Image (tube, rainbow, N blue to C red):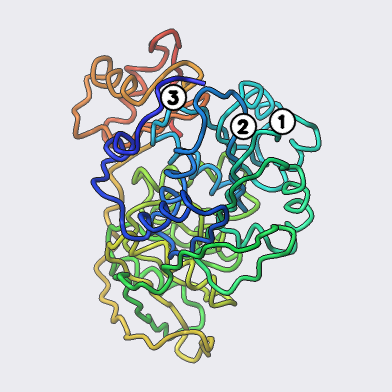
Amino acid sequence: MTSNQKTQKQILDKLGIKTLNEMQEAAQLAIQSAREVILLSPTGTGKTLAFLLPVIEALDPDFEEVQLLIVVPSRELAIQIENVARNMGTGYKIHAAYGGQSFNTDRQAIKHRPAILIGTPGRLADHLRRETFSTDYIKTLVLDEFDKSLEVGFEGEMTEIISFLPALEKKVLTSATQGIDIPKFVGLTSPVEVDYLHQGGSKLELKAIVSPDKDKLDMLVKTLCHLGDQPGIIFCNFKGTIARISEYLSDRGIAHGTFYGGMEQRERELSLLKFRNGTHQLLLATDLAARGIDVPEIKFILHYHLPIHAEEFTHRNGRTARMQSEGTAYVLHWKDEKLPEFMPQMGEEFIHDKGIPDGSQWHTLELSGGRKDKISKGDIAGFFFKEGNIDRAHLGTIEVKNTQSFVAVHKSIAEEMIKRLDNKRLKKAKLRIQHA
């Protein structure tokens, strides 16, 4: 274990946060003082930081074993929490284990014991069966988005995971949904509940867009032209619909990414990354994107299909108007379509076709070096400034992964950056640079 663990003030300074919000303060107090905590708060209110701060504070920096286990229902949520934890710069080793990446990659990473292990039920249960690491020192268990991870499909694996944890002293469960029955195998006795689901403060607007035709594709395009260049997610219920919409938008010159189950893991991660860095302003997605993905500053979401259940409607809407910011959820429906009973009253948005948006000015480049090469964001920025002679305004978001990195640059200079920087050395790594 390293000896450069940070104080909470140093962590918040690094994240650019001056003060915690009311929910985060209440969560921290509860987690510090109680053995069992249920944290309920809307999507986008900062739950990840709310539970990470107190549970990391309780870790022993001189002990080189897994001490904190965080179980999540999806690989995207595992990656998001890993990114938040790394950005905190706590000094503790962190690893996220999930399906879609090599088991041997996990095994090698866990061999150098992370203090914080994040993972999905299937992959974690697999590690526990193979005794990849000792569980004798895991004192804290976090079940994030527990309403999904405790569903029937995960019950066997979750029961198995909890049975492998003999030294637990603290359990923290988080959700953005209320009224979930917690199974007996979780072993809660008298949990403290921190409930901020109904505290208000959301600046979400809900608007209806009425399509005169049952086939809503033409109205969707008019809507996107009306909304202009701003980041948003279009939710569909089926990946087949996403393929049809994607083709229709591409034919009309509207750039976008896609995100749904069945995509290769790398393609899913790359699609989210391009959405985060602004290469794509629009994301066509199933409910896989309704929770647990790291996509800040979304101005709108659009329901091309309405979900079957009210809970998913809530989670989708929670992708915008986050952390007190403003946002709008649009419901695009046929004029004769019967809406579900859980739908609230909505005002209608009248669409004015303003022409195809100009689209993003950013383009994503992939670099062959990453954390394993001891390369940081600062190293990459300096590399582009010095070797690429790039203007600061033309360098966007940089994300460093384990074996590669991704850089957003202004699309007007993307080709020039590849010509100038491909095969150049950064530290000890000879970098290959290509379009992501």
CB contact under 8 Å: marks 2 and 1: yes
Q: Residues within 10 Å of mark 2 (few under 14, many from 20)?
A: many
Residue at the spot of label 1: 134
Please tell me which residue lies in front, 324 or 285.
324
CB contact under 8 Å: marks 3 and 1: no
Which of marks 1 and 2 precedes in the sequence?
2
Please tell me which residue lies in front, 212 or 386.
386
Q: CA distance from mark 2 to mark 1?
A: 7 Å
Residue appearing at x 58%, y 68% in the figure:
237
Q: Element at badge 1?
A: loop
Residue 399 versus residue 263 in the image, above or below: above
Residue appearing at x 39%, y 52% in the figure:
255
Residue 7 versus residue 21 in the image, above or below: above
Residue at the spot of label 3: 367
The answer, for residue 355, to whether it is visible in the render is yes
Residue at the spot of label 2: 66
Q: Position of residue 384 (x, y in %)?
A: 29, 21
Of labels 3 and 2, the one closer to you: 2
Q: Element at badge 2?
A: loop
